[in-house]
Amino acid sequence: MGIDFTALLDHSLSWDELYRLPELLDARFGCPAAALDAYLDLDDAPRPWRWDRDPRYSNVAEELFDAGHLSLSGPGGFSATVFRTGLELTHPARWWSFVFEPHVRDSLREAARAIATILRSTTIIYAPDSSHPTSGGSDLLFDGGSFGDVLRWFAERIGPPASGPHELAGAEEETSEVGYLVERVSG
């Protein structure tokens, strides 16, 4: 079982914008598909380039109030869970690929930055998931914590972020499992 790639983003969306988020993403998200398609070995068959909500709910407001978050499946293998102050973005690419394969890392970062623009994010945290120490940060969002709580949790529990992918790679592949990156973006 591999370690999953995860990106956590803050956002400053109003309730009205949260209700319309699937439509905003459909209209403005340009997935950097080329490198990720090669990684996933996807064929050239047409794929829906849209973000779909959880079909168990009749609308976004119902899901936000009932579940406390919004679950979206997106194009190119992306999935997102949207909370009041943050978003968790996942992709089938593994954390190892993010750390050690520049073309995968660049595509994942490009996608996260594109979503950050839509969300007016100021910060992206790139971290491994799958029950590794860093996954506790995203758990805070599921438990109702703010994105600020997540940043504090990472600093207190994991330590300072890596200065770049080269530091995540370290001398051994295993060192990448406990590191994370923080990228500041203009919101």
Image (cartoon, helix red, strand yellow):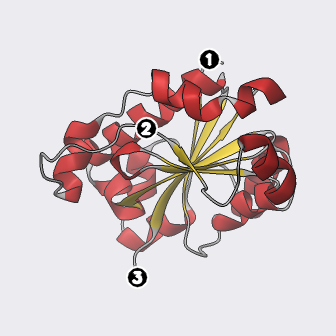
Q: Which mark is residue 186?
A: 1
Label 3 near label 1: C-beta < 8 Å? Answer: no
Residue type beneath disc 2: Arg
Image location of residue 179, percent across then percent down: 55, 59
Whole-number angstrom distance, CA of label 1 to CA of label 3 = 35 Å
Image location of residue 155, percent across then percent down: 75, 52
Q: Quadrant of residue 66?
A: bottom right
Q: Residue at x 70, y 58 (%)?
A: 138
Q: Quadrant of residue 144?
A: bottom right
The disc, 3 or 2, on the residue closer to the chain's N-terminal end is: 3
Check the image and report above or below for 183 versus 45. above
Q: Label 2, secondary structure: give it.
A: loop
Nearer to me, 5 or 63: 63
Residue type beneath disc 1: Ser
The C terminus appears in which quarter of the rendering?
top right
Nearer to me, 92 or 3: 92
Label 2 near label 3: C-beta < 8 Å? Answer: no
Q: Is 144 on the left-hand or right-hand side of 79?
A: right
Q: Looking at this rendering, what residue extends furthest in the top direction?
A: 186
Q: Residue at x 16, y 57 (%)?
A: 41
Nearer to me, 57 or 15: 57
Check the image and report above or below for 174 versus 114. below
| Foreground tag (3 vs 2) | 2
Whole-number angstrom distance, CA of label 3 to CA of label 2 = 28 Å
Whole-number angstrom distance, CA of label 1 to CA of label 2 = 25 Å
Check the image and report above or below for 174 versus 105. below
Q: Label 1, secondary structure: give it.
A: loop
Nearer to me, 150 or 39: 39
**Can the viewer see residue 170 in this picture?**
no
Q: Residue at x 52, y 30 (%)?
A: 25
The residue labelled by disc 2 is: 50
